[in-house]
Image (tube, rainbow, N blue to C red):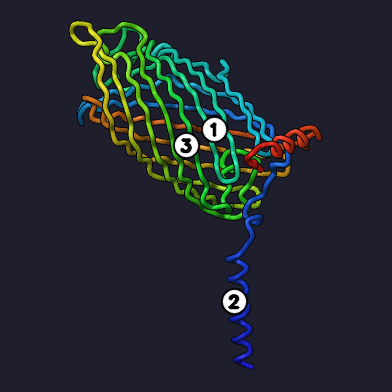
Amino acid sequence: MHGEMCAQSKSDSSWRYSQKKYLPDSLFIIRYDTLIHLQSWISANQMEYRFKYDKDFQLVLAPNDINNLSLGFSYRYLELGLSFSPRFINAQNDEWKKGRSEKFTLGFGFSMHRFHLSFDLTSVKGFYLKNSGDFSRSLPDTSFLLFPNLRVGYFSTLLRYNVNPRFSTAALSGGTQFQQRTAWTVLPTFQFATFSFHNEVDSTGVQAETTYSTDLNLLAPVMGTVVLSPKFSFTMGLGPSIGVDFFKSVALNDDRKVVKSNGTGFTAGYTFQTGLSYNNKRFYSGLQYVYRSYGHKIEDVKRLSKQYSYFQIYFGWRLRPPGFAKRSLDWANEVSPVKFD
């Protein structure tokens, strides 16, 4: 009898282990992509460029704070969005000391199975020297040294792959999916980005009038989502960034003649991300924060660091799609040589 009980206990234990080990992927992710999602979010984006010449001298350039209001639409594999900066969330009451900044952003994302491809085109004009106090210099009517005509433009393409089909990347910042069970993954990401730093006025105080930079980077963040309850989940991720940068500068010498120079630099940095999500049958919302920093040596600058932070509050609703929407996307999927769903 004792042996039979032991055998039964061992069999039950093996069965439980087998059940736990081979849970189907559908128990980890709830999919809502057959519904139409209308989403809105308010985001705060900030960037800094740190030109570090030595341990005692650096320049920290940044635009004034700019907040965006966005509206989005998603259904199955299709995602569309519009982002703008209304005055009521961009009062910029501190223009008198930080100057006025203008920002334009156009973005687009596309998901297919475990791949995600995104494009981002951004132009920012109007910067101030954040560490002006280190030099005891300022303009008569401001606390900071201003660069109102300095424009930074960049175009970025990111291609990301999710190694774990039980982890939902769509649930990180939207409602088309929700993580139902705790899971983690690695998200290898390839980035191609081009930058241009340009001062529109002839300033003898700026040696290099225009600098062009092309980044090729590989990011490998480890992401984990912890399910706190049937409606709440918490996400955190951290990982390195390595790559190479090709840069070219157009400068003016003492005789005001154009001098060109170029070079290649190794880049290194890291990325960090965290978020909290809420999911209901028709309503969803969440918070998300992303930070990235990476840099390299460039000419006489010991290290040029590019730092970006992004915080957003989002909320959305799910609606039943009309019949023509399903028929249209079914047709597009049938005629496409690559199946999206």
Q: For the point 21% across and 25% down, which residue is it?
A: 300
Per the image, the residue denoted by label 1 is 312
Marks 2/3 in contact by CB < 8 Å: the verdict is no
Q: Is residue 47 left or right of residue 340?
A: left
Looking at the image, do the residues carrying marks 3 and 1 touch, with CB atoms under 8 Å apart? Answer: no
Instruction: Please tell me whether mark 1 sits on a helix, a strand or a loop.
Output: strand
Furthest toward the bottom, the residue is 1
Spot occupied by residue 116 in the image (x, y as percentages of width and height): 55, 39
Residue at 60%, 30% (x, y): give it: 41
Q: In which image quadrant can residue 256 be found?
A: top left
**Which residue is denoted by mark 2 in the rendering?**
13
Mark 3 highlights which residue?
290
Q: Nearer the viewer, mark 2 or mark 1?
A: 2
Residue 97 versus residue 339: which sits nearer the camera?
Answer: 339
Who is closer to the viewer here, 296 or 103? Answer: 296
Residue 148 position by quadrant: top left
Percent of width and height locating residue 286: 59, 39
Amino acid residing under circle 1: Gln
Task: Tell which circle, 2 or 3, labels the residue nearer the N-terminal end.
Answer: 2
Q: Residue at the far left: name it.
A: 254
Up/down of 102 relative to 76, above or below: above
Tell me the amino acid under the disc marked 2: Ser
Instruction: Give me the C-alpha separation between circle 2 and circle 1.
Output: 45 Å
